[in-house]
Amino acid sequence: MFTKNKSKEHYDYPSGAVSTIAAGTTVNGDIESESDMRIDGNIIGHVYCKAKVVLGESGIVQGDLFSGNADIFGTVNGNVVSKDMLCLKSKATINGNIQTARLQIDPNAVFNGQCKMTSDHAPQVVPEKKAVVTVD
């Protein structure tokens, strides 16, 4: 029942963990996450997420967004790279290029840029990350 040997795996984030940037919050710097993210605030920098990103209607990313999957309801002023599925919802605005394997664009979504469709086996270009993050 009780053990003295606790593995490191016991302390890993739960698979259902979601990082949230609330409305009214501004982050200056790059953000990196292994788990899902929801962004309703303003990020001035790049977003690197290996899982799913949901950018809410009030959410703004002023930089590039890299994710496994993404649902965009807000605004991205930068490029969007999604490894699998990218959904641009009706109030989404993308001012930049898109690179993804699968793309869904709802009516009234705005996309100003070029789109490159990739296969699951094609390498995706991810720039080097910076380590500075500040939260206001």
Image: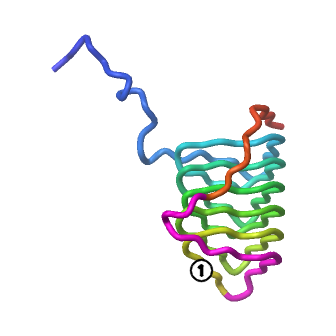
Looking at this view, name the residue that lies furthest to the front. Answer: 122
Q: Quadrant of the N terminus?
A: top left
103 vs 136: above or below = below
Residue type at the position of mark 1: Gln
Tell me, what colour scheme is on the image? Answer: rainbow
8 relative to 83 in the view: left or right: left
Q: Position of residue 121 (x, y in %)?
A: 49, 63
Q: Is 122 or 84 nearer to us in this picture?
A: 122
Q: Residue at x 78, y 78 (%)?
A: 111
Q: Is residue 133 magenta?
A: no
Q: Position of residue 32 (x, y in %)?
A: 65, 42
Q: Residue at x 55, y 75 (%)?
A: 102
Magenta stretch mostly in which secondary structure? loop
Q: Quadrant of the C terminus?
A: top right
Around disc 1, counting alpha carbons within 10 Å, would you say few (fewer than 14), some (14 to 19), or many (20 or more)?
A: few
Q: Position of residue 115 (x, y in %)?
A: 71, 76
Looking at this view, name the residue that lies furthest to the left. Answer: 1
115 relative to 49 in the view: left or right: right
Q: Is residue 121 magenta?
A: yes
103 relative to 121 in the view: left or right: right
Q: Residue at x 81, y 54 (%)?
A: 63
Q: Residue at x 41, y 45 (%)?
A: 15
Which residue matches tag 1?
A: 104
Q: Position of residue 10 (x, y in %)?
A: 35, 27
In the image, which residues are magenta?
A: 107-123
* Quadrant hosting residue 97: bottom right
